[in-house]
Image: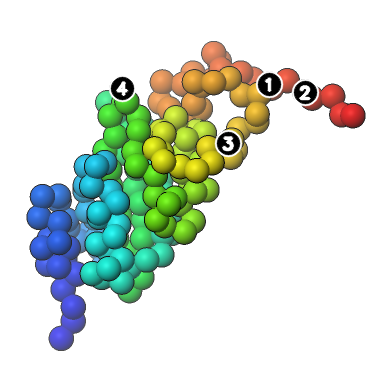
Amino acid sequence: MRFDYEKELQTLFPAGEARKTAERRYWVNVPPGELHDAVRTLRDKLGIVHLSTIVGEDLRDAFLNSYIFSGEVVVTVCVRIDRDKPQVPSLAPIVDGAMVYEREIHDLLGIVPVGHPDLRRQILPEDWPEGVYPLRKDYVVAQGPTETEKKEEA
């Protein structure tokens, strides 16, 4: 008999939406404050520990972070983030590999992973203007910087 991941996820996440999206692929929605508990539940109850990636998305009225975990199945944990206060708990303290993905999303979308140990730039140059996030849908290329300052070589 096959293990019923969909049923188990619905039992483990009764307040959130948990559903099967394709063969061996599942989707769970949780509020930001429940992210750590959701990830620990996947690890402790289902043995799903590998973070494949984190995808940040600008939905215009909010942001969405999708945390994609893989094991015997793929489970995507989705967290909707307030656009006016773009913060989400950092997974870096509890999940290996989260640090790099969170830095990238912070650089490009401005979503702050609260509790992250090292938010230095990941992709954008150091002289990129603060508060300018090139993957936000309201970013206008013509208004943004077209060239960063060139540093003189010593």
User: In the image, is 95 to the left or to the right of 5?
Assistant: right
Nearer to us: label 1 or label 2: 2
- Quick check: marks 1 and 3 in contact, CB under 8 Å? no
- Dot 1 or dot 3: first in sequence order is 3
Q: Could you classify mark 3 by the number of other residues whose Cα lies within 10 Å: few (under 14), some (14-19), or many (20 or more)? A: few
Mark 4 → mark 1, Cα distance in angstroms: 28 Å
- Name which residue lies at 41% across and 33% down: 111
- Tell me the kind of residue under disc 2: Lys
On residue 84, the disc is 4
Say which mark, if any, is on residue 150: 2
Contact between marks 1 and 2 (CB within 8 A): the answer is yes
In the rendered structure, the answer to whether residue 91 lies left or right of residue 142 reads left
Quarter of the figure that contains the N terminus: bottom left
Q: Position of residue 148 (x, y in %)?
A: 69, 22
Specify the amino acid type for callout 4: Asp
Residue 143 seen in render: yes
Disc 3 marks a residue whose amino acid type is Arg
Question: What residue do we see at 24% from left, 42% from top?
Answer: 33
The numbered mark, 3 or 4, whose residue comes first in the sequence reads 4
Element under label 2?
A: loop
Q: Would you say the residues marked 3 and 4 are in contact, meaning their CB atoms lie under 8 Å apart?
A: no
Alpha carbons under labels 3 and 4: distance apart: 22 Å
Q: Secondary structure at mark 1?
A: loop
Numbered tag placed on residue 120 in the rendering: 3
